[in-house]
Image: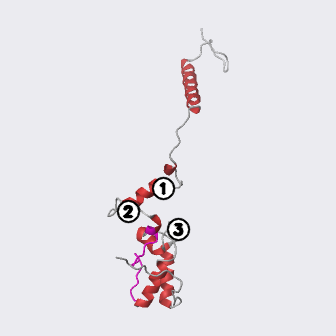
């Protein structure tokens, strides 16, 4: 005697064990998800969030690390960012006479970089040689000084006097 099974015919009423196991795992997963959903989360410190502004504590720590010769003194970030630089890294000023070199340095130490760092152009270059803003602006400034388009630094910051 041959048994024939029609397609779509109900089986003998037994549910396959695999299906029951899959349903149990699914129910367990949904239960865990609901349990975790309502749990309060501790917020991530804002200094660790991508794109967040760093806190004063983080800035102070970074500035202290950048100035190892004065670890105990509080660091004034404005004074650091406005510090005078007698040489501008990555810029070839050879061929400039002393007058034109003075003009170039005054402008490089007075103009702010627009990359958002807060440094002068010379300071930005001293701290970040890869800045794609300060490099081209310094080259344009150097070309203008070499070509004689900038002849006066009246009203532009002069080199600070050294006290002591």
Question: Residue at position x 44%, y 81% from top?
Answer: 105
- Dot 1 corresponds to which residue? 56
What is the span of residues highlighted in magenta in the rendered image?
A: 79-96
On whether residue 43 falls in the magenta region, the answer is: no
Instruction: Give the spatial CA distance, label 3 vs label 2.
Output: 20 Å
Residue 130 in sight: no
Mark 3 / mark 1, whichever is N-terminal: 1
| Disc on res. 66 | 2
Q: Which residue is mark 3?
A: 115
| Residue 1 position (above or below residue 142) | above
Q: Is residue 91 above or below residue 44?
A: below
Asked if residue 60 lies left or right of residue 150, the reply is left
Q: Residue at x 41, y 56 (%)?
A: 61
In this view of the protein, which residue sits in the foreground, 33 or 55?
55
Exactly how many numbered labels are in the figure?
3
Q: In the rendered image, which quarter contains the N terminus? A: top right
Q: Are marks 3 and 1 in contact (CB under 8 Å)?
A: no
86 within the magenta span: yes
Mark 1 is surrounded, within 10 Å at the Cα level, by few (under 14), some (14 to 19) or many (20 or more) other residues, namely few
The location of residue 94, given as percent across then percent down, is 38, 86
């Amino acid at each position: 005697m041959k048994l024939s099974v029609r397609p779509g015919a109900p089986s003998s009423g037994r549910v396959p064990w695999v299906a029951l196991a899959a349903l149990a795992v699914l129910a367990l997963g949904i239960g865990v998800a609901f349990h975790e959903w309502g749990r309060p989360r501790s917020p991530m410190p804002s200094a660790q969030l991508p794109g967040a502004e760093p806190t004063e504590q983080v800035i102070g720590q970074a500035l202290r690390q950048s100035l190892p010769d004065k670890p105990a003194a509080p660091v004034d970030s404005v004074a650091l960012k406005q510090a005078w630089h007698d040489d501008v890294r990555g810029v070839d000023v050879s061929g400039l006479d002393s007058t034109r070199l003075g003009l170039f340095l005054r402008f490089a130490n007075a103009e702010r970089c627009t990359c958002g760092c807060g440094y002068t152009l010379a300071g930005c270059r001293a701290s970040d040689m890869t800045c794609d803003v300060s490099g081209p602006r310094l080259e344009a400034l150097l070309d203008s000084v070499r070509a004689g388009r900038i002849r006066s630094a009246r009203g532009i910051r002069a080199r600070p006097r050294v006290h002591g």
